[in-house]
Image (spheres, grey):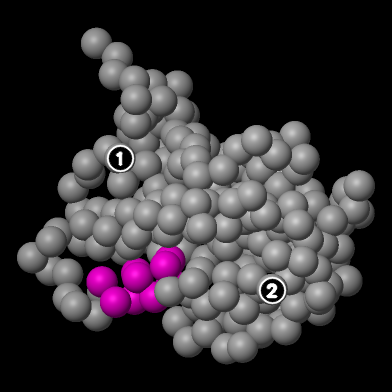
Amino acid sequence: MSKHIAIIGGTSGIGWETLKRLKSQGHALHVACRSSEKLAELDIQPQLFDALSPSSLVWPEKLDGLIYFPGTIQLKPFHRLTAEDFQKDFQVNLLGAVAALQSALPALKASGNASVVLFSTVAVSQGMPMHASIASAKGAVEGLTRSLAAEWAPVIRVNAIAPSLTDTPLAAGLLNSDLKKEASAKRHPLQRIGSPDEFAELTEFLLSDAARFMTGQIIHVDGGLSSVKLF
């Protein structure tokens, strides 16, 4: 059955794959992002939204789902991180999501059975060097996920996906050589990095009625990195 779904971001990587997948299945997509050029090929006219300075958004009377895609990868040693670095990561990953969710809340409530999907990172549960800022921001996203799942039940479900390194434009600097790709793959028990289409499939599932008994979950999709150690 066709659903009305709000998508924040979605013009590259996991977001783009998800957007194309949902569009092909006939869902009504209400997109808010920084640039409209790429969406023209899907005949989508988005609202303009920048997570660094969120503007007010207008939604239909009813939304069956919302996905928040904006994210950052800012990897530095702790002693080189500035307050501005932390503020940017929190603004894009947490406060941008808060602004989008608050604007969409009346429409999500009107659905009576809505689903929200947020994104965390494996670095919250698996300590990694040079991830202090992004892990802190995404840790806040996980706290928000569980808090809203409790506050909005049973009308709105809220879950988060926690990926490890995925082959997206955002991660291009970490995967810009065969040597880097091979080294990253070997850190995962499944010996590879993630693909955007895998996360698009999971996001689609979480929005669907098939996931109607799931809420407050942080779903680790990381090739076993957070839970498996090979000796």
Q: Is residue 74 left or right of residue 191?
A: left
Q: Residue at x 17, y 76 (%)?
A: 82
> Count of labels shown?
2
On residue 106, the disc is 2
Work out which quarter of the rendered image holds the C terminus and state it: top left
Which secondary structure, mark 1?
loop
Q: Is residue 94 visible?
A: yes
Q: Is residue 104 above or below residue 118?
A: below
Badges 1 and 2: C-beta atoms under 8 Å apart?
no
Residue 12 colored magenta?
no
Q: Is residue 96 left or right of residue 76?
A: right
Residue hosting label 1? 125
Q: Residue 157: percent from the left, percent from the top?
A: 62, 50
On residue 86, the disc is none
Which secondary structure, mark 2?
helix
Q: Residue 29: percent from the left, percent from the top?
A: 80, 65
Q: Which residues are magenta?
A: 86-94
